[in-house]
């Protein structure tokens, strides 16, 4: 399985605690946090990821 190509969130300021997103196999979206020592990866379906982003944007002062 090829390594995911991670993209850092545009909301990430300078520092070590950033969310990274990558496209996965079978149409999944992967999320990880750069400061997580376990390197855990959360996988979600595209529709679920869109719902997450929409919810975060509604609750964000920048949204």
Image (tube, rainbow, N blue to C red):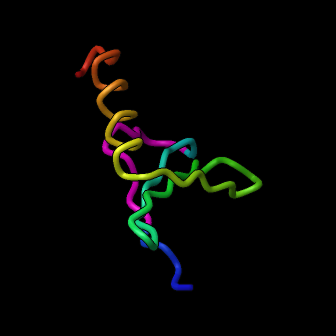
Magenta region includes residue 41: no
Q: Which span is picked out in magenta? A: 6-15
- Single out the residue that lies furthest toward the left: 63
**Image quarter of residue 22:** bottom left
Q: Position of residue 7 (x, y in %)?
A: 38, 60
Instruction: State the quadrant of the N terminus.
Output: bottom right
Magenta region includes residue 7: yes
Instruction: State the quadrant of the C terminus.
Output: top left
Q: Nearer the viewer, residue 16 or 54?
A: 54
Kindly identify the residue that appears in the image at 28 percent across and 14 percent down: 61
Which SS does the magenta portion mostly show? loop
Q: Nearer the viewer, residue 51 or 34?
A: 51
Q: How many marks?
A: 0
Q: Nearer the viewer, residue 55 or 37?
A: 55
Q: Position of residue 8 (x, y in %)?
A: 40, 54
- Single out the residue that lies furthest toward the bottom: 1
On the rendered structure, is 34 left or right of 4?
Answer: right
Kindly identify the residue that appears in the image at 49 percent across and 51 percent down: 44
Look at the picture and state if 59 lies above or below 24: above
């Amino acid at each position: 399985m090829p390594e995911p190509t991670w993209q850092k969130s545009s909301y990430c300021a300078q520092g070590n605690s950033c969310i990274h997103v990558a496209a996965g196999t079978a149409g999944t979206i992967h999320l990880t946090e750069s400061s997580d020592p376990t390197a855990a990866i959360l996988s979600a379906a595209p529709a679920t990821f869109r719902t997450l982003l929409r919810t975060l944007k509604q609750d964000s002062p920048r949204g």
